[in-house]
Amino acid sequence: MLIKLLRAHLGPYSRPITLLVLLQLVSTIAALYLPALNADIIDNGVVKGDTGHILALGGVMIGVTVVQAICSVAAVYYGARTAMAIGRDIRAAVFDRVQSFSARELNSFGAPSLITRTTNDVQQVQMLVLMGFTLMVAAPIMCFGGILMALNQDVPLSALLLVVVPVLGAVVITLVRRLRPQFRIMQTRVDTVNRVLREQITGIRVIRAFVKDRHEQDRFAGANSDLTDVSLKVGRMLSFMFPSVMFVVNVSSVAVIWFGAHRIDSGEMEIGALTAFISYLMQILMSVMMATFMFMMVPRAEVCAERIQEVLATDSSVVPPTDPVTELLTRGQLELRAVEFRYPGAEAPVLRGIDLVARPGQTTAVIGSTGSGKSTLLGLVPRLFDATGGQVLLGGVNVRELDPVVIADTVGLVPQKPYLFSGTVASNLRYGKPDATDEELWHALEVAQAKEFVEQLAEGLDAPISQGGTNVSGGQRQRLAIARALVSRPQVYLFDDSFSALDYATDARLRKALARETAEAAVLIVAQRVSTIREADRIVVLDEGAVVGSGTHHELMADNPTYREIVLSQLTEQEAA
């Protein structure tokens, strides 16, 4: 998966990668040339007392060193830029794919896991690419080049390499095999910590209300301890790696000096050659150490790449049309024909046989007990998920065939849990219509009964809104969400229990103002509160996912026991009449 992911994103950067490899090649060749020059200085300069030869080769060594330094700096520069660009591209690809997901895929992965995959997992792959460009490209060149140069200095002594390099490789491979499953567990436990922390931050009010601080602290401590345990296990393995490598390196150095001294004593080798051989041995072993450092990162990056690829390989269940329709046949009409919706693996559908028509200038309400499928029904219109049976028609066209932009322009959805983005009041209201004027914003706020409290804010429309709208009350958040939908002036309004946080007086004023504002649009309201929908032109009663009644308030009170039961659970007989 790691190779597949990198192959898909390395293509656009073939030029800088090629330049990077050339720079690393020149830098490594320069580094390999320096010990040979040093051996020549010792054998033909120092031993013979030839100062001129020493100065001449010393100047060459300085020049080679300068070239090596320049190439190394340039290689690291291009490597860092390319690695960061690849990380940016992978993050963008994951983000774009997540944005295309329907509610089904989002629930399948979960928000904490998607956040971890987009940030931490991508960062691990990005760091592997960076280390690969700065270390791994040079390591094989230095290793094989060092072996050739060592053979050039003394072939019999090079036989030590046949023992040293395989031993070092065996140590690295053994540890990498043991690290890979631990890194997979580590990433899963990072997900768990993120999930627990997210739940505790989001539900802090509930935790305080039930005095569950100690319980949540223990829960987080458990998740944190699990992550700490696996991190310590990985750390212990890594702590064993470097001493093992250094032990092999030091034993190799002693062996080279021991056997090299005997060869010098017998006249089969010169002192400069032994010095150069030791330098090449160090370069060979250092290249293996660089590869070791890389291999330490590979298991974790491979696990992260699998998790990233899992997101990229997941197709949304809501597929955009290949030849989208960009014009509606009729204005502002919503129709559901024999609609069914079933969650994957569910024994029974959530919705079945739903027939419903919402016409321009009319208010259609949907009411039913908890779990009857009201919110699911509304989610089918803007294609938060697609119906598994029947048709959802918007302006006479199946929503599956409509351009998503047309759906967004036609439908204004106020969700059951209104969400505000960090920014200002104005930036949130302009979310659906970026070019809306201040006059349009104030008008929408007035209709939504939010103008008064916004005027009381010191900055007015420029008043800051925190993430999720947590710095305003639930009722204010609902009214701002309604105003946001009104600003874009859609042809179809969908209100998913959007008045539940309002008091009865505000609810009545808001519905009265909405009736004037939406006179030419189709309005579909889902509500639990009977007083919110009793004046609707048509009320549809849902029970266990099926329509069990349709009509006006008085008609349903007369002949629909399900609706009558709901009404009398909230109102008296006299109030209901």
Image: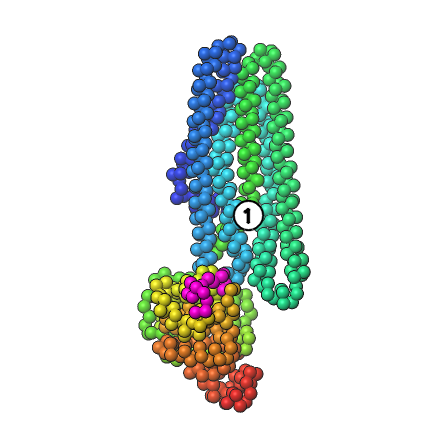
Q: Measured from the top left, where is residue 57 in percent x and y?
A: 45, 17
What number of labels is visible?
A: 1
Q: Is residue 71 magenta?
A: no
**Can residue 378 be seen here?**
no
Which quadrant of the structure image shows residue 294? top right
Q: Is residue 242 above or below residue 335?
A: above
Q: Position of residue 30 (x, y in %)?
A: 46, 25
Q: Is 275 located above or below residue 232 in the figure? A: above
Query: The magenta stretch spans which residues?
Result: 455-469
The foreground one among 517 and 125 is 517
Q: Residues within 10 Å of mark 1 (few under 14, many from 20)?
A: many
Kind of residue sitting beneath label 1: Val
Q: Is residue 227 visible?
A: yes
- Residue at which label 1 appears: 303
Residue at image location 60% in from the left, 17% down from the top: 260
Is 262 positioned to the left or the right of 515 in the image? right
Q: Position of residue 494 (x, y in %)?
A: 43, 73
Residue at point 43%, 41% (across, down): 81
In the displayed structure, 285 sits above or below 98; it is: above
- Tell me the quarter of the picture where residue 246 sits: top right
Q: Position of residue 7 (x, y in %)?
A: 44, 44
Residue placed at 64% from the left, 60% from the top?
Answer: 216
Q: What residue appears at the point 57 percent right and 55 percent down from the top-left corner?
A: 194
Up-down: is 33 above or below 464?
Answer: above
Q: Secondary structure at mark 1?
A: helix
In front of the other: 53 or 141: 53
